[in-house]
Amino acid sequence: MSQSLHFFTPSSLTFSKQSLPKPSCNRRFPVTTLSPKLISIKASTSADPNSSTTPPQVLISDNGTGAGEILSSTPQDYDTPPSQSFLSDLSSIDVDAVTEVELKENGFRSTRRTKLVCTIGPATCGFEELQALAVGGMNVARINMCHGTLEWHKRVIERVRRLNEEKGFAVAIMMDTEGSEIHMGDLGGASSAKAEDGEIWTFSVRAFDLPRPERTINVNYDGFAEDVKVGDELLVDGGMVRFEVIEKIGPDVKCRCTDPGLMLPRANLTFWRDGSLVRERNAMLPTISSKDWLDIDFGIAEGVDFIAISFVKSAEVINHLKSYIAARSRDSDIAVIAKIESIDSLRNLEEIIQASDGAMVARGDLGAQIPLEQVPSAQQKIVQICRQLNKPVIVASQLLESMIEYPTPTRAEVADVSEAVRQRADALMLSGESAMGQYPDKALAVLRSVSVRIEKWWREEKRYEAMELPAVGSSFSDSISEEICSSAAKMANNLGVDALFVYTKTGHMASLLSRCRPDCPIFAFTSTKSVRRRLNLQWGLIPFRVSFSDDMESNLNKTFSLLKARGMIKSGDLVIAVSDMLQSIQVMNVP
Ligand SMILES: Nc1ncnc2c1ncn2[C@@H]1O[C@H](COP(=O)(O)OP(=O)(O)OP(=O)(O)O)[C@@H](O)[C@H]1O
Ligand SMILES: CC(=O)C(=O)O
Ligand SMILES: [K+]
Ligand SMILES: [Mg+2]
């Protein structure tokens, strides 16, 4: 009957089985009271070996088979008294109405796992429009500091906040820096400019009087006229429109349109010579410009959840920004997302991702820096590395580009979205489709329905990709958490459980579970609003805010009754629970 297993640790951990004690009211032991069917594996260690005199233990209990055997508990883990706020907050759990309805109507399994980011622009900045996006499944609202004034962005942030407060959403805010690459001016207020084949346009660093003279474009980079040469190819937005440089007159560069198209305000500009990107000069520009620093100060002051850094070249700039944020806002939760959109970022990919809290495959500019046909493989690689390093990854740009103008996507766009979902990216992003397109809600609905459909198909076919997930933590305690999460995810798949529950203060344990991309959804319970919002970017997590204690038994009882009362779970549902307070895996039916 007895099983034992030894870990080699400072003090040895043992697996063993003992007789199941009768539940008693003063015995605070979660495994005995929750349900008739329950298995608990507990590996209790202290992150700080000096903080506890109790040797770490691993416990296995199983009273689900009727064998009714269990071993002694480690009382210290259960005896932490619930805090005042916990007691006073017994009835409250934050979940948005949309998730609640989705869980009630469709059950856990059909909830969407891929997260959705929407760029907010003139088409979606009003409260009603923002609400429509939240209802439509927006998890993160992105504001792009290339466009709009600080006052405009501030109003958007306020509206998203109000939406969260009033409607219970946990929409996170991502601020995206402008970066100091070369781009066009704002077209003097026009929403776009059309360049036709063969037309001659003037690109200049000169400021023009309004109204903007016909066929002229402002360029933000002073060295532009010096750097380009006659014969160079000038690409707007990575090739959406192409020009050939035909003449230079002082600050004015005359160009002939060779590939016609629509140019959007502040579109990115790159120039190419003999088939390769000219980057000597703009490579000298700082990744974070002085304007970016002001925007970052604004983002910190406004308490945004994510800051996405454009045109990252090295890990150094990420580390620099992270220490700046840490110094500026002591207990700030702002996560830094590295935008992979340059040749340099591809060169230093692993170290950049390692230093960041997440990454974005910014295909718009990336496709302007590397040949377009290399973008898909770069995307796959970035998504894979992020997953291995346990960092959330967003696939961005042109997912549904045609929906800026049309109410239905092209088949090719649907295939592209499907591919990103199949790669199990954490999130998909809308840019122009939601910022200035005619059908933002429809575009979001397409992302949503394609995600759900592909995820379902993938699960039905049991198409697990065998991805090696290397250890990401440095301490032994980290390794235990990783092992627990990968075992819990595997158990969840094998047992066909309805949901994984994770109680997490920092969100780390939830992200480790998400990394395993299990079949079932992950209910992530966290006590702070900011962690809840941040988790909203990660694959498969349904973040709830609820106050909880170190006592897993009461946490589980409390969440079960709260969720049952709201009709989000029911008796008999099979759940696996893990937490970052108590290193254990518990399998149980909802009582
Ligand atoms: N705050 C805004 N105000 C006005 N227009 C905006 C705003 N945000 C986005 N847009 C419009 O939506 C388009 C697509 O947005 P997106 O965020 O992808 O920007 P982008 O200029 O392509 O640059 P990036 O490379 O930073 O994504 C922009 O080109 C712009 O026309
Ligand atoms: C999103 C972004 O910055 C890009 O695709 O270039
Ligand atoms: K940007
Ligand atoms: Mg970009």
Image: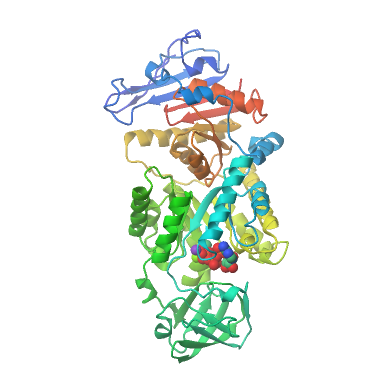
x and y percent of residue 45 in the render? 35, 27
The residue depicted at 37 percent of the width and 36 percent of the height is: 479
Foreground: 391 or 460? Answer: 391
- Count of marks placed on residues: 0
Foreground: 249 or 270? Answer: 249
Foreground: 565 or 87? Answer: 87
Picture layout, residue 578 above or below residue 538? above
The residue depicted at 64 percent of the width and 29 percent of the height is: 569
x and y percent of residue 562 in the render? 61, 26
- Residue 516 visible somewhere in the drawing: no
x and y percent of residue 578 in the render? 48, 30
Q: How is the image coloured?
A: rainbow
x and y percent of residue 107 in the render? 67, 35
Q: Quadrant of residue 165?
A: top right
Picture layout, residue 442 above or below residue 485? below
- Assign the C terminus to one quadrant of the image: top right
- Residue 568 visible somewhere in the drawing: yes
- Assign the N terminus to one quadrant of the image: top left
**Going by the picture, which residue comes out furthest to the right?**
407
Q: Quadrant of residue 343?
A: bottom left
- Position of 147 with respect to 344 (left or right) is right
- Position of 168 with respect to 531 (left or right) is right
The residue depicted at 39 percent of the width and 42 percent of the height is: 331
Picture layout, residue 22 above or below residue 207? above
